[in-house]
Image (cartoon, rainbow, N blue to C red):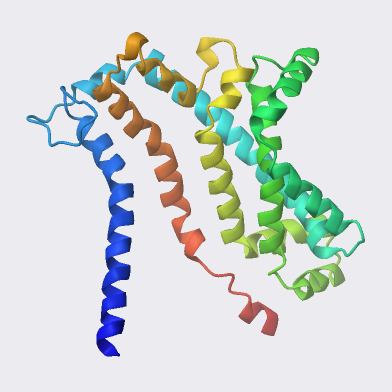
Amino acid sequence: MASRRTTHRLAADAGLLVVAAAFMLPLAWVLLSSVDTEANLQVKVPDGVTLSNFDAVLTPEITFTPLLNSLLLCGGGTALTVVCAALAAYPLSRFRSRLNRPFLLTILFATSLPITAIMVPVYALFVQVNLIDTLQGTIFFFAASQLPFAIWLMKNFMDGVPKELEEAAWTDGASPFQSLLRIVLPLMGPGVAVVTVFSFVMMWGNFFVPFMLLLTPDQMPAAVSINEFFGNRGMVAYGQLAAFSVIYSTPVILLYVLVARRLGGGFALGGAVKG
């Protein structure tokens, strides 16, 4: 019996190692190719480490301007998503109504719609309202596309905050909006962090939306400008592509590091409820 459990554990460990290797190989290729002047599709240790690939891509046209555009688009879209999701999730979490479940099912259905199916009418609408080729228009659509799932996440976290804390604040004269800002959102900090990171990551890696809604090259984000490394007739600057990928991934990694403690933190509501 013990030997069978040992065999199963070893098989599970081997399976996990295979999965880990499948994830690590692309990462290893990016890191090694970024410092290799003769990089190709093979994962190999470079003959000599060089930073020439980074020197080639660290220019305003290739990296700095697209990254700034990405930060403006994704940062603005994430902020708008988190604010709107909190305001929408609060009444769904705190007030019971017959319309709550149909509304939640409706927005859940909205998350299943493929983005390619709605881009044609969205493009036509943006042309009519003069939002095509504008950063603010792309920010609005980014927020609208991420809002349904963000509302679901925010509501689930908000359900974990005891309503008794708000009722005590209401007794002291606080309005529902004040209780949301000063009690509910601070206590559900990990939930807000999850929604923020999820929304930012989904927007950061989105190629299709800015490619369709933005026309001016100077407004293109890094998710679109990375396509410039794929030349005609199958020619690809693999070393520069890998170097740009490392730089492109840095903001997402930094964001996760900044909120890692909040993601791992608990709600710490026990003492508050007892007090």
Comparing 170 with 51, the one in front is 51
Please tell me whether residue 1 is drawn above or below residue 154 in the rendered image: below
The residue positioned 56% from the left and 54% from the top of the image is 194
Q: Position of residue 23 (x, y in %)?
A: 33, 48
Q: Position of residue 161 (x, y in %)?
A: 70, 69
User: Is residue 183 shown left or right of residue 189?
Assistant: right
Q: Where is the N terminus found, in terms of image quarters?
A: bottom left
Q: Position of residue 250 (x, y in %)?
A: 38, 38
Q: Quadrant of residue 45?
A: top left
The residue positioned 39% from the left and 31% from the top of the image is 248
Comparing 166 with 238, the one in front is 238
Q: Residue furthest right?
A: 98
Comparing 121 with 152, the one in front is 121
Q: Residue furthest left?
A: 47
Please tell me whether residue 134 is drawn above or below residue 265 in the rendered image: above
The residue positioned 65% from the left and 41% from the top of the image is 146
The residue positioned 15% from the left and 22% from the top of the image is 38
